[in-house]
Image: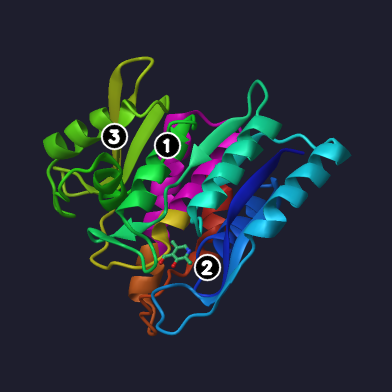
Amino acid sequence: MKRVISIQDISCIGKCSLTVALPIISAAGVETAIVPTAVLSAHTYFKGFTFRDLTDDMEAVRDHWKQLGFKFNAIYTGYLGSERQMDIVESYFDAFKEDGTWIIVDPAMADGGKLYCGFDEHFAKEMSKLCSKADIILPNISEAALMLGEEYPGEEADEETIKALVLKLSTLGARLSVITGVNLSDGTFGFIGYDSEKKEFFKYGSKKIPMKSHGTGDVFASAFTGALVNEFSVYDALCIAADFTSKCIENSFNSEEKIEYAVNFELELPYYISRLKK
Ligand code: PXL
């Protein structure tokens, strides 16, 4: 059985980070070893959230797994609570990266041009250093702009603007840089990426749903990781992730509750699993 590590927080309410990665990657038939970076009562969209930092446990977890001899097909990181955690995450890459282990970094820290509560511009710069150690990075437009110190071009930025941003992003060092949450010129919604080995851009758009929701980046990155480890190509895994995320948003959009703190990813897991059948 394939096995991945996912390093991010547990937000007890709010359907993001590990409470999304664990069910989605497991649904892909992949064992998901987790490193919780912090426990929050709810994600930072909710006022008054509690925050218990777990940085001090992260190195001991790494050392124990190393001692037990576990091996991993991918390491996927999302929301990290502090700069020190980024250094420890790098040490996970050093400890567990082997030939064929994918390093996937989703620099989850901003949306709508604004950093999440508790982060500053220095944090964004440090995140760009972590991205330089990855094979694949998956920022949204806000995160890409913040890591590069560029002005935020807005959610409606055109394809040429995003291409310029993703090209600059590729100089950080990851082989594949992918900007998510992009409005494409044909009216679809998806991603634009750049492969720095092949020197090629690639893009894909899925059905655009007129609703913005929290946690969609985590749904996308988790679905991508599950598909990639199931040996879909990077591009096919990204397309599966885009289609699944669009379905999850559509499901929430059509539901009576219309929550905006998360999407109804649970109800679309059968669709995701069906896409993984070869
Ligand atoms: O979905 C990204 C995310 C992850 N973790 C925490 C968050 C957010 C977004 O707001 O607050 C704690």
Task: Choose the circle earlier in sequence order: 1 or 2.
Answer: 1
Task: Choose the circle earlier in sequence order: 3 or 2.
Answer: 3
Crowding near the residue tagged with mark 1, few <14, some 14–19, many ≥20 C-alpha atoms within 10 Å: some
Q: Which residue is mark 2?
A: 267
Element type at mark 1 = helix
Task: State whether label 2 is within 8 Å of ligand 1.
Answer: no
Residue drawn at x 39%, y 47% is 242
Q: Position of residue 277 (x, y in %)?
A: 60, 41
**Residue farthest toward the right in the current orientation of the protein:** 68
Q: Nearer the viewer, mark 3 or mark 2?
A: 3
Q: Is residue 157 magenta?
A: no
Report the side of 38 relative to 56 (left or right).
left
Q: Are marks 3 and 1 in contact (CB under 8 Å)?
A: no
Q: Are marks 1 and 2 in contact (CB under 8 Å)?
A: no
**Residue toward you, 250 or 127:** 127
Q: Amino acid at mark 3?
A: Lys
Report the side of 15 relative to 235 (left or right).
right
- Residue 211 vs 271, above or below: the answer is below
Q: Position of residue 99 (x, y in %)?
A: 65, 20
Query: Residue 207, can we see it?
Result: yes
Element type at mark 2 = helix
**Residue toward you, 194 or 115:** 115
**Magenta segment, which residues?**
219-248
Q: Position of residue 257 (x, y in %)?
A: 39, 84
Q: Which residue is mark 3?
A: 203
Residue drawn at x 36%, y 14% is 198
Q: Which residue is mark 1?
A: 129
The part of the image, by quadrant, that contains residue 149 is top left
Label 3, label 2: how far apart the Cα atoms are: 27 Å
Residue drawn at x 30%, y 33% is 169
Q: Amino acid at mark 2?
A: Leu
